[in-house]
Image: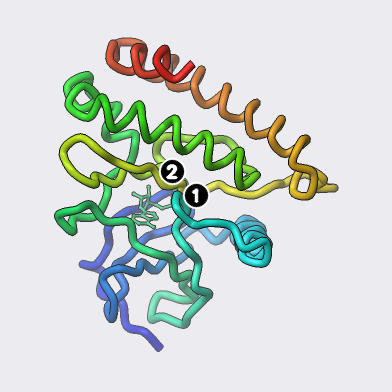
Amino acid sequence: MIEINSSALIGKGLHRECYVHPQDKNLCIKVAVNENIKETQREQKYYRFLKRKNICWDMLPKFYGNIDTNMGSGAVFDMIRNHDASVSKTLEHYLDSNENTESHYAGLVQSLALLKAYLLTENIITMTIKPKNILYQELDAENGRLFIVDNIGNSDLLPICNYSKRLGNKKILRKWQRFESSLLKTYPDNKALVRILANLN
Ligand SMILES: Nc1ncnc2c1ncn2[C@@H]1O[C@H](COP(=O)(O)OP(=O)(O)O)[C@@H](O)[C@H]1O
Ligand SMILES: [Mg+2]
């Protein structure tokens, strides 16, 4: 059993707490707090599907399976870190203030365009895309890369979109469009964000 110290907490969502793996700082362990077994099973099933498809993991943390911890069962993923080894922050953090967005303007434009292209190329289906579930990895002062850390997969009863790239891409474009609209609604005063999205299209 792996012993996690509560001081290793690096992030928390509605359902899970994310800890640094005590034996490898480049891995994180996610433990359920408000147990949502269905959601976890759906995510892990989709991860296994992507592994079988042999996709490239450039913008998705790899999943290494489940382990027993003192906090219950934990799911092990790559920990996303910046060039200076600090843990990457959410896109929400970079959009929260006009100044934060402005100072990473070029990296954000480029990495958003690359994330959209990545999802389409690999046909990675997502649920609602939210800025708190995307991390911006600072590669250097100007360049970065985005990772989706939560809410991937397909909840359709018959997940045809997983198998048809044409239908999958249609769904991805729809989700992406909604993502952009929701960003403009959430951050109406962020002028840099408006320019970023205009630049993307
Ligand atoms: N692979 C990761 N590397 C670094 N930080 C992460 C990683 N995954 C999640 N986090 C951090 O933990 C938070 C919660 O994780 P998340 O998977 O979104 O949990 P939940 O399912 O509860 O929403 C994220 O918002 C992020 O700040
Ligand atoms: Mg989340």
Spot occupied by residue 142 in the image (x, y as percentages of width and height) = 20, 35
- Say whether residue 134 is left or right of residue 117: left
Residue at 52% in and 26% down: 179
Q: Is residue 178 left or right of residue 191?
A: right
Counting labels gives 2
Label annotation for residue 164:
none
Of 91 and 186, which appears nearest the observer? 91
**Mark positioned earlier in the residue sequence (2 or 1):** 2
Q: Secondary structure at mark 1?
A: loop
- Spatial separation of the CA atoms under disc 2 and disc 1: 5 Å
Residue 41 seen in this snapshot: no
Tag 1: residue type? Asp
Give the vertical position of 62 relative to 131 (above or below): below
Say which of 70 and 189 sits in front. 189
Label 1 CB sits under 8 Å from any ligand 1 atom: yes
Task: Decide which of 191, 66 is in the foreground and name it.
Answer: 191
Q: Which residue is mark 2?
A: 133
Quadrant (top left/top right/bottom left/bottom right) for the N terminus: bottom left
- Residue lying at 35% horizontally and 43% vertically, measured from the top left: 145
Q: Quadrant of residue 113?
A: top left
In this view, 87 is above or below 4: above
* Above or below 152: residue 94: above
In the image, is 153 to the left or to the right of 24?
A: right
44 vs 171, left or right, is left
Residue 187, horizontal then vertical, whole percent: 35, 18
Q: Residue at left 32%, top 65%?
A: 19
**Crowdedness of circle 2 by 10 Å Cα count: few (<14), some, many (20+)?**
some
> In the figure, residue 17 lies in which quadrant?
bottom left
Mark 1 and mark 2 in contact (Cβ < 8 Å)? yes
Please name the amino acid that badge 2 sits on.
Answer: Asn
Q: Which residue is mark 1?
A: 150
Badge 1: residue crowd in 10 Å (few <14, some 14–19, many ≥20) = some
